[in-house]
Amino acid sequence: MKRVAILISGGGSNMETLSRSMTGDHPARPALVLSNVPDAGGLVKARAMGISTEVVDHRPFKGDRPAFEAALAKAIAPYTPDIICLAGFMRILTPEFVGLWQGRMLNIHPSLLPKYRGLNTHQRAIDAGDHEAGCTVHVVTGDLDDGPILGQARVAVLPGDSTETLAARVLEMEHRLYPEVLRRFAAGDNTPVCLPGPDERPKTGERSD
């Protein structure tokens, strides 16, 4: 059984979805939820689910990222995770830290990578006049929002969409995509997951199970 550590910074909706999916015949279980924000709402949710939690506040380490990441690694190590899932963890990690879990760290990003790395992804898609947006789960590397893509889910950009309305629909797809990718990844299957939007059918050859 694989052990999963989930890193968050906020309300933890993806963390909660991932954690609740790891039951029954799932090949993994949540071992830790860690946040860099002491009062993150996701910590409360994790504790209510009986998951161990840790906090490493980034603020005392301002200007010293190596020291912050050393504290992160020290907090994570006792839980001996096989997989790290970044789920709204709003800190950029150095290649040195990522290297500690090379090939075993996943992230979900609210765009169809390689489009719109970084922040403000929904507004950038709207401003560009894109007809579709979505989310991507990928293996984390030392480069920002890069690494092998393990899954994508798409939604249409509708006329009149705001950042908030588009973000809400993308988040729904994140909650479908991330658990599916994690289940496969924990079982050793890196076949990309391609989820269609609610009003689409899978293209020929795409896996949507």
Image (cartoon, grey):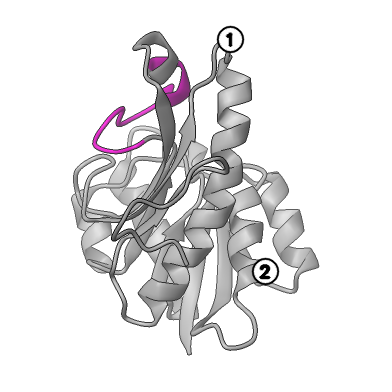
Kind of residue at badge 1 = Gly
What residue sits 46% from the left and 23% below the top?
A: 122
Rendering quarter of residue 162: top right
Which mark is drawn over residue 103?
A: none
Decide if residue 13 is in sight here: yes
Question: How far across and how far down the image is residue 186, in percent?
Answer: 40, 78
The residue stretch that appears in magenta: 112-124
Give the alpha-carbon distance from disc 1 to disc 2, as whole Å.
34 Å
Q: Residue furthest right?
A: 48
Residue closest to the eye, 71 or 24: 24
Magenta stretch prevailing secondary structure:
loop
Q: Which x, y percent locates residue 107?
A: 39, 52
The residue under the point 34% across, 63% down is: 105
What residue lies at 41% left-to-right and 52% top-to-bottom? Answer: 202
Q: Please, what is the three-letter code of the amino acid marked with disc 2?
A: Arg
Residue 197 in percent (x, y) is at: 51, 43
In primary-sequence order, the first of circles 1 and 2 is 2
- Which element carries disc 1, helix, strand or loop? loop
Up-down relation of residue 36 to residue 177 (above or below): above
Q: Which mark is residue 20?
A: 2
Residue under the image location 49 percent in, 35 percent down: 155
Please tell me whether residue 132 is drawn above or below residue 158 in the rendered image.
below
Coordinates of residue 2 in the picture (x, y in percent): 45, 84
Q: Is residue 147 above or below residue 37?
A: below
Q: Which residue is tagged 1?
A: 160
Q: Is 177 colored magenta in this rendering?
A: no
